[in-house]
Image (cartoon, helix red, strand yellow):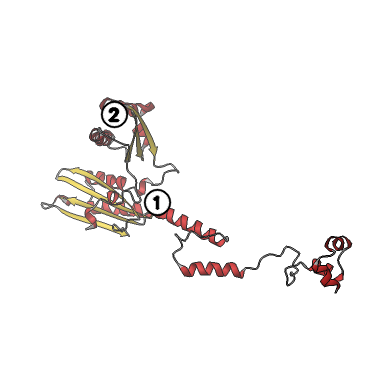
Amino acid sequence: MGHKVNPYGFRLGIIYTWKSNWFGGRDYADSLHQDVWIRKHIRSRLSRAGISSIDIERKGDQIWVFIRTARPGIVIGRKGAEVDRIRRDIERVTRRRVDVKVEDMNSAASQLRPETDATLLAQGVAEQLAGRVAFRRAMRRAVQTAMRAGALGVRVQCGGRLGGTEMSRREWYREGRVPLHTLRARIDFGTAEAKTTFGQIGVKVWVYHGDEIPAAEKETELARARALAHVSAGGASTGALITDRAEAEAIETEEQAVPEPSTDGGEEAGEDGTPPEVEATVEDGTPPEVEATVEGSPATEASEA
């Protein structure tokens, strides 16, 4: 069941974003076909450049093309000649201004490394199969390379006339975990085709990079943490994010158990809330200025009696 669904499309909008970012109205179909042509043209033109992905953004009459590659020197060419040639080809087809940007996967800022990228691993296996390397050896080598580079799970599958047999078949190797049904699991998926003398062999690679919490769930957790912090500080709770009554009661108990700091150097106040020094003044006698102020009051007459 899960093997027939593209892992990227299955998680699109949950943990993955779109690879083409633009808004189209009546020209939606034309823009879509242009994006397909741009990706196909770049991959056919730079088949040995180790291209992992191609992202496209549109705004007005401007188009940005981001090429993520493991061999930026081949994509750029001598003095940028290859990039300029690709830019002119895209401008001729789309009739818009085009800016091509190359991203190096070997840089420290890159999230994915070439050794754990599914598309590059599939391309490597396909190149080995075209070079008459045994398919089992090529598959095992790809799995070991990805696991050594830090992947949590890898699966490599080849299908076609493996070994030159008359009947085609599929074989695969897997190491680690590859949870295809877990939507928060970051599964990198890549395909490639090897053109051999006895037919075409397809290669598929799945790489598991760990779990990622969806953006909506992150916002909920942050809002809940802020509400709990507000309640613990003595503020009023919204009541919408704290669903556990026992948790709220525990927070109230902790607040009551914490003693309030004294403002008069640690001495306790009197029974009627009057500070100790004020009580001592009243017992020994009211100061003259106070007697002059309160003379004739009921409290003064009661004290004299």
Q: Earlier in the sequence, mark 1 or mark 2?
A: 2
Q: Quadrant of the image for the C terminus?
A: bottom right
Is 146 left, or right, of 273 in this rendering? left
Q: Nearer the viewer, mark 1 or mark 2?
A: 1
* Residue bearing mark 1: 215
Q: Tell me: residue 105, above or below residue 244.
A: above
Q: Which amino acid type is marked by label 1? A: Ala
How many marks overall?
Answer: 2
Is 208 left, or right, of 29 in this rendering? right
Viewer-proximal residue among 125 and 97: 97
Q: Residues within 10 Å of mark 1 (few under 14, many from 20)?
A: few
Going by the picture, which residue comes out furthest to the right? Answer: 288
Mark 1 and mark 2 residues within 8 Å of each other at the beta carbon: no
Viewer-proximal residue among 119 and 201: 119
Viewer-proximal residue among 62 and 78: 62
Return the mark for residue 236.
none
What percent of the width, then of the height, locates residue 3?
Answer: 23, 55
Q: Quadrant of the image for the N terminus?
A: bottom left
Q: Which amino acid type is marked by label 2? A: Ile
Q: Quadrant of residue 294?
A: bottom right
Is 20 left, or right, of 249 in this rendering? left
Identify the element where label 1 is drawn: helix
What percent of the width, then of the height, locates residue 149?
Answer: 39, 52
Is 259 left, or right, of 222 in this rendering? right
Return the mark for residue 90.
2
Identify the element where label 2 is drawn: helix
What percent of the width, then of the height, locates residue 62?
Answer: 35, 29
Going by the picture, which residue comes out furthest to the bottom? Answer: 305
